[in-house]
Image: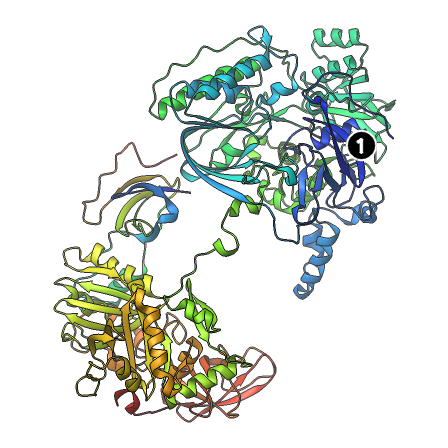
Amino acid sequence: MARSARLAEGGRIDRSKSVRFKFNGESYQGFKGDTLASALLANDVHLIGRSFKYHRPRGIMTAGSEEPNALVQLGEGARTEPNIRATQIEIFEGLTARSQNCWPSVGFDIGAVNSVLSRYLPAGFYYKTFMWPASLWLTYERFIRKAAGLGQAPTEPDPDRYAQHHAHCDVLIAGGGPAGLAAALAAGRSGARVILADEQNEFGGSLLSDAEAEIDGAPALAWVGAALEELRALPEVTILSRTTVTGYYDHNFLTAVERVTDHLDPDAAPPNTPRQRFWKIRAKQTVLAQGAIERPLVFAENDRPGVMLASAVAAYIQRYGVLPGREIVVFTNNDSAYATARLAARAGARVHLVDAREQPPGPLLAEMAALGVETHLGCGVVGVSGTKAIHGVDIAKLTEDEKGLAGPPLQVSADLIAMSGGWNPTVHLFSQSRGTLRYDETLASFVPDKTPQKARCAGSGNGAMMLAECLREGFEAGAAAARDAGFTVETPESPDAPALLDSPPRQIWTVPTVHPLGQGKRKHFLDHQNDVTAADVHLAAREGYLSVEHLKRYTTTGMGTDQGKTSNINALAILSEIRAADIPSVGTTTFRPPYTPAGFGAMSGQAVKDLFEPERGTPMHPWHLANGAVFEDVGDWKRPRYFPRDGEDMHAAVQRECRQVRETVGIMDASTLGKIDIQGKDSGRLLDLVYTNLFSSLKPGRIRYGLMLNEHGMIFDDGVTTCLGVNHYHMNTTTGGAARVLNWLEEWLQTEYPDWEVYCTSVTEQWAVATLSGPKARDVLLAVAPEMALDSDSFSFMTMREGVVAGIPARVFRVSFTGDLSYEINVPARYGRALWEALMAAGAPYAITPYGTESMHVLRAEKGFIIVGQDTDGSVTPRDMGMDWIVSKKKEDFIGKRSFARPDTAREGRKQLVGLLTEDPTFVLPEGAHLVSAVNPAPPMPMIGHVSSSYMSPNVGRSIALGLVKDGRNLMGRQFQVPLMSGRVETVTITEPVFFDKDGERSRG
Amino acid sequence: MLQITCPWCGPRDAVEFHCHGEAHIARPEKPHEISDAEWGDYIFFRKNPKGVHFERWTHDAGCRRWFNAIRNTVTDAFIATYAPTDPIPEIPTDDQGDA
């Protein structure tokens, strides 16, 4: 058992509540309030995982959501989750986690051979190596994913539930540190609706790790407590802890992930509570108070387990009561890390302080001397001994130009390095809001400048690094945001907080080592998550990737789940040194949402499984289900595709259904056809505008087929329209085109002809439709509608009659899409199933068969009837379809007419609809197959057309097909070749596109 | 997500709307009397400005009505929305929807 690094006292952990958890199969003990990272450090576990590319041993670098290294696979089975930052997981009894990216174990990792081979794995390695042949890329990629990878996705369905919450507020505040709390107080006091969100389990931000901070002469956390108490009493203020504002989108739309029960044992979580809640927030104003992240120093071997940010070491000591090392080297270029040295020394560690500066402030040096801290001024850490743990640190004097060592390195015994390269304001959300950044020379970092959105920044995220400034900026931003949201409020007076020393840093972007960069074994890591080194940036620059955007893609620095939280500025700075340009002119890349990874579960919410997408069923749907229908999706509709009987496959069922319709009678559910009720004195005018043929002359009770074109003259829908009475029409559209056609009519009425009086109403769902089709259709209908005159003189083809069918008031349309005698019987939707069952009973003597969309397709293809969207594709005119007969010569204008005269639309030789018969009558061409005049040994071959519809027709007794062929109508009887994927070449003959009942007698009889 | 103010329903999320491109393109009254070039201009050619743009929108998941909008294509700021039959609003000189 390793030693305990837990301090005897201190921290915000609850020492009365012991928590047991497992890491890599070993059992450990921590306390309630620990993160996985703090509990592992307390147990002296520093080696957490292996790195992405080189599989180098990695430990814990930070104490927050910026962690690039300590990513673990959390949980088991269906609940396992990869790439979770150990620094953010609150431990609970029974938690399990394991290292990822290593095999067979984190201590002995076969992939670490990549580290030895690193000379051959430079920046852009994947681009350089895995380029050609493209066909091998899939093989390469599988290998890379397995070798690199970042954890494993669960393979079982997610057992947890997730919720979504839409919210509107006056002021959204991202970040609950001193600035965010001050902003919430100022805005909340105005009565504004405020949402205050913080990613941590407790509010206070940096103050949680700073036991020495004071506000108005009292401990700062007392001020935090009072602020929270006041905020909780304000009814319009919503306080969300464990909630990360992940994205800032257009028009002040933000998303946040609330981890509701992630800190609890999933088996003991409260019932009826979602695991996570995804917030979609529209905020009138925002205050971004995300704080700042400490900048790592780029020195040799700075990725070893035990190299941490100085502020993280301070956080482990003060917030978690853990001293992560006993011999600590603090390496800094600024004043802030002296606090860490002080805390570590007081906690009992032996401390060396290495300051790159020659002359740090005297008071700090005096304090270090008093604490027994050995200081090394004008020095840097130039090497680290140890791979899975640190056991020594090389310290050397740096030359004035910072490029080399001014003396031989001194090795000191150490097990931890606490580094500080300054502070980067967290500008991620501001950047996502399309905000531009400004370079601050003093901070050597970017700060928010301008945003087109209603956002303000406050606190250290805005570059204000002192506590008093954070509070003042928070109060001002909160009050101003409330005022801009329409509330009246005074800016509260800001409390006092003592200022700390803040003398100028010595910015060394790459700390030299004993050998030139990239020429020895020691690596300077920039982006720990993506394994990008300083040498990689130099290499990329040498190869010409000098733009910051190119650098990012080529080296992958700043990409991945941490979005460059710790690496970005260092990479930019090194690039700017190489280019001998200042950092602002080099520029910066854009931070992308989410701020920290958000699970698909939370984003999907309840929209999974049956609730993923709405489904539409007709009133007859339950009958179809009960009678074994196989369904297909047509838009949102579930339509029966065929009705198999015992042992039938689709082919057998469809052949039987098609034969039965032609022999006696079949019945189809046509309820999904689009139906639009059109009324008003200008209805006929509208129909004449949108259809190619004349409708205003249609008499009540008569039906006409129509084609609709767009202004390009291309077919975009077809259907029949019936005149119900004076200025009253019933329009049928295709099932898929219902919404599109209604919008089309509305577009013309609302935008171009608002003075026309026409009312269009969708009635698709108001009517259930059963279509009887076949020679016995009349007999079946007569049996249930004895009072209707059905003889052809009284009720002729293309007319509509109202009457009573099976005791139900009905509109019966005598139209035909099968080419056989057909009646489309429309009844109010709620009678749909009753009608269907009555027709099935009446049809029994004729062996009536229900048939689905597949048989409908075969039957209509036998007749050469087109399906818009299958035989047309948006580039097909009525003339191309051989449907000149439906284009009015008399009408001066209709939509699309003018385009017929355009040279390309009018030219000869366009693709035209023809029939295609295969040489082998048993062979069914695949739809989409291409016709060529001659088969070459290899592509390309000039293509003259394609197959659009193709079926085995039982009624024609062979396979049939429709296709679009260049100049097809002049090629009747000619033969062409259809080369297929299988290697087979089929010969086809061009024919008329009608295969059955060419005179059309059957539908009129 | 953009927030768009429907002239009839008020501010709503962009998922309820569809954009239909440039506004104020009248259909030629006598299509057969104009040249192919003029007709081609009507059906194919659209402005694609960087900055202030006049567009047609529909509130599909709401009142299903068409309206026009003035949007700055750089900032996505909506300067005005108005009914198809309304006159084109004057754009205030101090509000080009700039950042």
* Residue A92 percent location from the top left of the image: 69, 33
* Residue B64 percent location from the top left of the image: 28, 52
Which residue is pictured at 78% across the width and 44% down the height? A55
Q: Nearer the viewer, residue A714 or A446?
A: A714
Quadrant containing the C terminus of chain A is: bottom left
Relative vertical location of residue A339 with respect to residue A170 in this rendering, above or below = above
Which residue is pictured at 24% across the width and 72% down the height? A810
* Residue B86 percent location from the top left of the image: 19, 46
Residue A633 falls in which quadrant of the image?
bottom left
Mark 1: few/some/many CA within 10 Å (<14, 14-19, 20+): many
Q: Disc 1 is attached to a residue of which chain?
A: A
Residue A925 shows in the view: no
Q: Nearer the viewer, residue B22 or B19?
A: B19
- Which residue was labeled with disc 1? A45
Quadrant containing the N terminus of chain A is: top right
* Residue A297 percent location from the top left of the image: 71, 28
Relative vertical location of residue A253 with respect to residue A938 in this rendering, above or below = above
Q: Nearer the viewer, residue A819 or A737?
A: A819
Which residue is pictured at 14% across the width and 59% down the height? A757
Relative vertical location of residue A935 with respect to residue A144 in this rendering, above or below = below
User: Colour scheme of this structure image?
Assistant: rainbow
Residue type for callout 1: Val
Which residue is pictured at 17% across the width and 71% down the height? A724
Q: Please tell me whether mark 1 sits on a helix, a strand or a loop.
A: loop
Relative vertical location of residue A663 with respect to residue A562 in this rendering, above or below = below
The tally of labels here is: 1
Relative horizontal placement of residue A70, taking residue A659 as reference (left or right): right
Residue A195 shows in the view: yes
